[in-house]
Image (cartoon, helix red, strand yellow):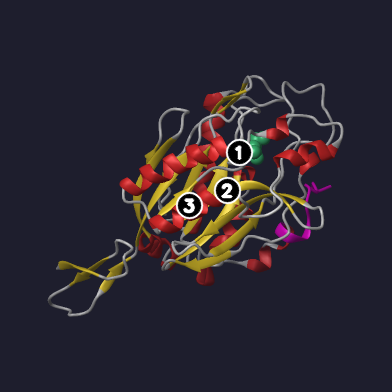
């Protein structure tokens, strides 16, 4: 076999088997998982955008086709702050996407022909609030929009906790489901942080054939309600969730942290890329700004999808009624 340029400009390689005489196109997407170090409350959006641009340039030098930034990439993780007047928190929301402050990011991505995904706090035209992310393709087209569905935390100030986690105060649960988009020769989905702990998240996308899930997160390194659950345990659950989601749905998972200490509150790292067999193939060390670059062959998801996780052959939906029919646990008598 020998490699020929496929002409897509996307770094794909066409392997030409001499004895068979047809083209098998490997669908390689080189991904840059762009971790952000801490963003202090006082740091401006413009300063964060400069940091994101520096990561994008580095990703480009590393040959990336797609750059993925974390959840709420443009601001500090503000749900830790309790604002008695809810509207005070609107300072952290974007009323339009793109907007003049983030436009340089869109412009640079288009110039570099790099696709990108990042999370932000979305304020809609009718005053609704979501924890959202977008997927922009390599031609600068907005192809995907996701709103976080599994919101952790609480609504009111909780004096029992070591720190606040007020996502339920500041956001509504997403109303867009878990879509998967066909783009750049593959099938892409998004989810955000706590969504990764729910198998339903991955299965919803798996049932649409997803080949790569893009996922940003801000995870405090200590459980606010259980001090004994620290960094090691949190990282274990993080890996467990990503690896299970990837394997059970035969998909790549790109998980990107906002890490480090924001105004005295520590967020864990753990930026990593997981392959469709559930293996962690790349992991970023440290808690500062950095990119983790890995070539991902989307066809690596085929084997799992056609064998043990061939859903059409093996799923038994007649026994899954509780999954959508009930929320909490109902114990038998
Ligand atoms: N931003 C998050 O969703 N954080 C949660 C924490 C609160 C557990 C997470 O699942 O990582």
First in sequence: mark 2 or mark 1?
1
Q: Quadrant of the N terminus?
A: bottom left
The residue at 83%/28% (across/down) is: 157
Ligand 1 has an atom within 8 Å of the beta carbon of the residue at disc 3: no
Left/right placement of residue 211 relative to residue 24 reads right
| Quadrant of the image where one finds ligand 1 | top right
The tally of labels here is 3
Q: For the residues marked 1 and 3, what is the alpha-carbon distance in whole angstroms?
A: 33 Å
First in sequence: mark 1 or mark 3?
1
The foreground one among 253 and 214 is: 214
Label 1 neighbourhood size at 10 Å, few (<14), some (14-19), many (20+)?
some
Determine whether the residue tagged by mark 3 lies in a helix, strand or loop. helix
- What are the residue bounds of the magenta stretch? 323-333
Badge 2 vs badge 1, beta-carbon distance below 8 Å: yes
Say which residue label 1 marks. 45
- Dot in front, 1 or 3: 1
The residue at 43%/66% (across/down) is: 184
Ligand 1 has an atom within 8 Å of the beta carbon of the residue at disc 2: no
Whether residue 216 is visible: yes
Residue 73, position as x, y percentages in the image: 58, 41
- Dot in front, 3 or 2: 2
The residue at 22%/79% (across/down) is: 22
The answer to which image quadrant residue 292 occupies is top left
Label 3 neighbourhood size at 10 Å, few (<14), some (14-19), many (20+)?
many
Q: For the residues marked 2 and 1, what is the alpha-carbon distance in whole angstroms?
A: 8 Å
Q: Is residue 29 above or below residue 262?
A: below
The residue at 54%/62% (across/down) is: 206
Say which residue label 3 marks. 246
Say which residue label 2 marks. 102
Q: Main secondary structure of the magenta part?
A: loop
Q: Is residue 150 above or below residue 310?
A: above
Residue 8, position as x, y percentages in the image: 32, 69
């Amino acid at each position: 076999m020998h490699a020929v340029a496929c002409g897509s400009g996307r770094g794909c390689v066409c392997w030409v088997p001499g004895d068979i005489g047809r083209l098998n196109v490997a669908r390689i997407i080189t991904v840059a998982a762009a971790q952000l170090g801490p963003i202090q409350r006082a740091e401006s959006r413009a300063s964060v955008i400069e940091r994101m641009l520096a990561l994008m340039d580095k990703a480009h030098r590393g040959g990336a086709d797609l750059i993925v930034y974390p959840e709420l990439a443009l601001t500090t993780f503000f749900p830790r702050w309790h604002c008695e007047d809810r509207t005070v928190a609107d300072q952290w929301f974007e009323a339009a996407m793109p907007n003049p402050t983030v436009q340089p990011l869109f412009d640079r991505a288009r110039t570099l022909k790099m696709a990108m995904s990042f999370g932000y706090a979305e304020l809609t035209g009718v005053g609704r609030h979501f924890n959202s992310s977008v997927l922009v393709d390599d031609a600068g087209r907005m192809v995907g929009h996701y709103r976080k569905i599994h919101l952790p935390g609480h609504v009111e100030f909780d004096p029992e906790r070591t720190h606040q986690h007020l996502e339920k105060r500041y956001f509504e649960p997403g109303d867009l489901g878990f879509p998967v988009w066909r783009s750049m020769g593959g099938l892409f989905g998004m989810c955000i942080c706590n969504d990764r702990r729910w198998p339903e998240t991955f299965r919803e996308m798996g049932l649409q054939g997803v080949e790569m899930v893009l996922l940003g997160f801000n995870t405090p390194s200590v459980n606010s309600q259980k001090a004994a659950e620290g960094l090691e345990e949190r990282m274990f659950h993080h890996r467990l969730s990503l690896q299970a989601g990837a394997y059970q749905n035969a998909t790549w998972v790109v998980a990107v942290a906002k890490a480090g200490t924001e105004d005295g509150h520590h967020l864990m790292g753990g930026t990593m890329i997981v392959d469709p067999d559930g293996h962690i193939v790349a992991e970023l060390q440290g808690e500062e700004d950095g990119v983790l670059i890995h070539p991902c062959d989307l066809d690596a998801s085929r084997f799992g999808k056609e064998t043990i996780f061939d859903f059409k052959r093996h799923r038994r939906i007649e026994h899954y009624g509780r999954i959508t029919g009930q929320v909490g646990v109902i114990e038998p008598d």
